[in-house]
Image (cartoon, rainbow, N blue to C red):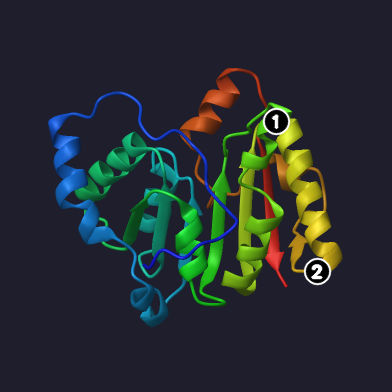
């Protein structure tokens, strides 16, 4: 997709441990073939789902395997996570995943209106220092982009195990809704945000949070 400017940027690590030869080969050979194209998004006959910051890719791969009619797109700046997902795609023969390594900003800017039926942002970097709050992915600019690209009735799923990040996210949604009431929080009781739905598989970051005694929170918003 073309690279259009936007105020939103996805921050995160670019690289971790050195990649193995097989991972390098996947990045060189497989990744270019899985690049999401605007025309494919428009032409796809079924739902299109997007995960921003997919980490190791286990959630996106699970969703693709369980929903073969869905075009599942993932954007991730961390090259080691991209390599892990590519290996799983090749190993399981998943044909309905598209992968973009890099910044979500130009991708979102290039998506047509009402293109997505679901958006996932699961356990994003909390950027705990106040001076870094501007780097948090949940922001007024992200929500404006999400409101444009999500079709009416689409679902926006967000998870975090950091209480301050959950408060921040709910405040950002509330502020957005003051200007345009686009997102309806789908919660009627406490269990709705403390119990992960059956079609919401655990990520490695959630498993780590549970091992370390933190409680994940699961938020679901309906695009009005």
Q: Which image quarter: residue 128?
A: top right
Could you tell me residue 187's position as x and y percent? 78, 54
- At a point 80% along the width and 70% down the height, the residue shown is 180
Q: Which image quarter: residue 150?
A: bottom right
Q: Earlier in the sequence, mark 2 or mark 1?
A: 1
Residue under label 2, please give it: 181
Mark 1: few, some, or many residues within 10 Å (few <14, many ≥20)?
few
Q: Secondary structure at mark 2?
A: loop
User: 94 or 150: which is nearer to us?
Assistant: 150
Q: Where, quadrant-wise, is the C terminus in this rendering?
A: bottom right
Residue under label 1, please give it: 131
Q: Which image quarter: residue 143?
A: bottom right
Could you tell me residue 219's position as x and y percent? 69, 49
Could you tell me residue 104's position as x and y percent? 48, 54
Could you tell me residue 155's position as x and y percent? 62, 63
- At a point 60% along the width and 49% down the height, the residue shown is 197
Q: Distance from label 2 to label 1 (Cα)?
A: 29 Å
Q: Pick out the residue farthest to the front.
A: 5
In the image: residue 169, left or right of residue 196 = right
User: Total label count?
Assistant: 2
In the image: residue 148, left or right of residue 105 = right
């Amino acid at each position: 997709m073309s690279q259009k400017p936007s105020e939103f940027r996805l921050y995160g690590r670019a690289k971790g441990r050195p990649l193995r030869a097989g991972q390098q080969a996947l990045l060189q050979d497989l990744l270019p073939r899985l690049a999401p194209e605007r025309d494919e998004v428009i032409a796809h006959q079924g739902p299109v789902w997007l995960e921003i910051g997919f980490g190791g890719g286990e959630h996106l791969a699970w969703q693709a395997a369980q929903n073969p009619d869905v075009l599942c797109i993932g954007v991730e700046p961390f090259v080691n996570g991209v390599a892990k997902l590519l290996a799983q795609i090749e190993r399981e023969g998943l044909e309905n995943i598209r992968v973009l390594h890099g910044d979500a900003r130009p991708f979102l800017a290039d998506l047509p209106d009402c293109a997505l039926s679901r958006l996932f942002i699961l356990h994003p970097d909390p950027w705990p220092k106040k001076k870094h709050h501007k780097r948090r992915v949940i922001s007024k600019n992200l929500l404006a982009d999400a409101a444009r690209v999500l079709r009416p009735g689409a679902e926006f799923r967000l998870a975090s195990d950091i209480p301050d990040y959950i408060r921040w996210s709910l405040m950002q949604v509330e502020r957005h809704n003051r200007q345009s009431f686009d997102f309806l929080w789908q919660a009627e009781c406490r269990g709705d945000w403390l119990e992960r739905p059956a079609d919401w598989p655990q990520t490695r970051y959630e498993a780590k949070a549970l091992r370390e005694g933190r409680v994940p929170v699961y938020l679901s918003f309906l695009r009005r």
